[in-house]
Image (cartoon, rainbow, N blue to C red):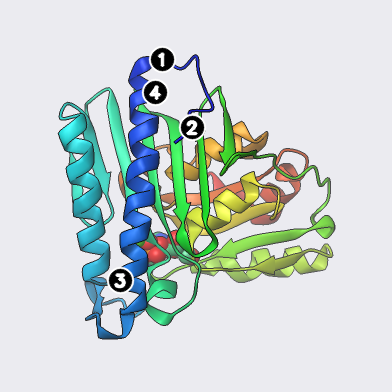
Amino acid sequence: MNNPIPDLDPRLRQRYQLARELAEEAAGKGLEFYRKRVSLKVEHKAGDQQDVVSIADRELELFIRDGLQQAFPEDGILGEEGGAQNLDASFVWVIDPIDGTACFLNGLHNWCVSIGLLQEGEPCLGVIADPNHAELFHGVRGHGAWVNDEPLSASEAQHVREGLTGVGTFHPEGKQHFMPFLQGLLDEGGMFMRNGSGALMTAYVAAGRLIGYYETRLKSWDCLAGLVLVQEAGGRCNDFLRGEGLLEGNPYLVAGASVYDQLSRLVGPSLDG
Ligand code: 2AM
Ligand code: CA
């Protein structure tokens, strides 16, 4: 695999290389599960009928965790399925083996593997692999972001009417903010879409395909990799990691720099409250 960043700190270079390899391998394994999804047993998390998980999520997370731990046993890891370990380490991986699990299990092509990395608490690299569309989004803080070999650049829209805004909400918390936001967006002449994967919609903001993306509440493994991409693509994000954001999640907004303030106003005080 090409390394687009020749002058990278060796500690980051090795981790960037491994993250891209593991994400692509896990995405390939994910595709094999996806093709036989009708035979996978589906479980519901904590009694929430919409929050689903299968053996595919668990096996892919184990695969990624094993790969990271073998190469960097000193690093911490936080994963959607396997929980947290060693979060005081300098480098902490934040992984979602399948983001868009409901899509995955229902035969919709909007799911991906997301691997992000914190260095001293700051997002420093992100990799998102989408095997259905043969796209690998990847980037390193301060060095740029790409989809495959193409540089990412966030939208230059100045008003929500100029493009599509990704949206999302989820049980059990925060959904009361969803309809007021949609109403405001439509009143301003904007339009929405929801594809079911927070990581992919974040990557699409970095790529300028969506002008922004608002989710009433997201978990860190859904967006941490994407945050690096948006920032490197010239976009903006809210202070998602504030408070207990890493472990508990927070409201979430990413957008092109010139439309961010308008979207933030449409969300209102709940965004950073
Ligand atoms: P998942 O597919 O990894 O579960 C879509 O709106 C986004 O919501 C997806 O990224 C999905 O991630 C995420 N999601 C699923 N369950 C959630 C929950 N209980 N709280 C917050 N986000 C959730
Ligand atoms: Ca997941």
**Label 3: which secondary element:** helix
Q: In this orientation, does residue 74 appear? A: yes
Q: Of the residues under marks 3 and 2, which one precedes in the sequence?
A: 2
- Quadrant position of the N terminus in the picture: top left
**Label 1: which secondary element:** loop
Q: Which residue is mark 2?
A: 2
Q: Position of residue 132 (x, y in %)?
A: 49, 65
Q: Which residue is mark 3?
A: 33
**Callout 2 crowding tier (Cα within 10 Å): few <14, some 14–19, many ≥20:** few
Note whether ligand 2 is within 8 Å of mark 3.
no
Q: Which residue is mark 4?
A: 13
Q: Quadrant of residue 38?
A: bottom left
Left or right, 228 with respect to 73, comes to: right
Q: Position of residue 27 (x, y in %)?
A: 37, 57
Q: Position of residue 149 (x, y in %)?
A: 59, 39
Please determine whether, in this image, residue 90 is positioned above or below residue 62. above
Q: Of the residues under marks 3 and 1, which one precedes in the sequence?
A: 1
Q: Which mark is residue 9?
A: 1
Q: Which sits in the foreground, 264 or 223?
A: 223
Q: Position of residue 54 (x, y in %)?
A: 25, 72
Q: What amino acid type should be assigned to the residue bearing mark 4?
A: Arg
Q: Of the residues under marks 1 and 2, which one precedes in the sequence?
A: 2
Q: What amino acid type should be assigned to the residue bearing mark 2?
A: Asn
Please determine whether, in this image, residue 153 is positioned above or below residue 249. above
Q: Of the residues under marks 4 and 2, which one precedes in the sequence?
A: 2
Q: Residue at x 73, y 43 (%)?
A: 261
